[in-house]
Image (cartoon, rainbow, N blue to C red):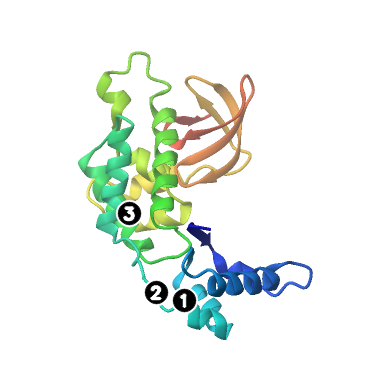
Amino acid sequence: MDGVLFIDEAYTLANGYELDFGKEAIDTLLKDMEDHRARLVVIVAGYTDKISEFIASNPGLQSRFARQIEFHDYTAGEMLQIFERLAAAHNFELSSDAAITLRTYLGTVEGNDGFGNGRGVRNLFEAAVVSHANRIAPMELPTARDLTLLDRDDVVGALPAAAIETFRGVPGWSADNCDELLDLEKADRVFHQRFGYGEVLGVEGSKVMVDFQKVGQKIVHGSFLERA
């Protein structure tokens, strides 16, 4: 009371499972919104289509949630800005060719609920940082520039394998490079300058899961592997 109740993914209350308390929660919520309308603000949130179905499922919900605000998905350009701000906040810089590659990929997931908008960009940034770490790990004396620059390989290494085809024709990213990254298969024997010999367990884009003899399982960038 005397505050705001915010319910994210509110439509899960109306899933209709026999043993849950969703219907009871909705009935209680409707009564309190009516009895205490001067003391209680309720906000429900979620994907547009599912929230619309949720509101339409109950006449009481329709009359009480009379005001709706729709937040449109981020555009590819806006998602690129989010990525760049995350990078800057963690003392990273995105190279120009990496930005082109990233912008191209984000254009393919714009408006896709499965990507997750800002959350998807954050996950992509975190994966790019891991890819960057794998790339510079073999360097004996990395420069400050090496340590803070996210390049195209780092970005592509963070993408799903299915996205590789998107970058055929992107300046600086040739089909030959793509084919080289996808050349390894499960059970191939490989050598890494830092981790030594190992066996490929799986490949996703430029990311390769390897079971190394000395250090165990690690995910590394495919460009740093040689066939043993």
Q: Position of residue 173 (x, y in %)?
A: 29, 47
Measured in 3D between alpha carbons, the distance from the residue under mark 1 to the one under mark 2, in whole angstroms, is 7 Å
- From the image, state whether disc 3 or disc 1 is nearer to you: 1
Circles 2 and 3 in contact, beta carbons < 8 Å: no
- Disc 3 on helix, strand or loop? helix
Residue ID for mark 1: 65
Judge the density around disc 2: few (<14), some (14-19), many (≥20) Cα neighbours within 10 Å: few
Q: Quadrant of residue 133?
A: top left
Q: Give, as a three-letter code, the residue at label 3.
A: Phe
What residue did someone put label 3 on?
A: 167
Above/below status of 86 relative to 162 = above
Towards the viewer: 79 or 103: 79
Label 2 or label 3, whichever lies nearer to me, is 2
Question: Which amino acid, mark 2?
Answer: Gln
Residue denoted by label 2: 68
Number of residues whose C-alpha sits closer than 10 Å to that of mark 3, classed few (under 14), some (14–19) or many (20 or more): some
- What is the spatial separation of the Cα atoms under label 2 and label 3, in whole angstroms? 39 Å
Residue at 72% x, 67% y is 21
Evaluate if marks 1 and 2 touch, with contact meaning CB atoms under 8 Å apart: yes
Foreground residue among 39 and 21: 39
User: Measuring 35% from the left and 66% from the top, which residue is drawn there?
Assistant: 71
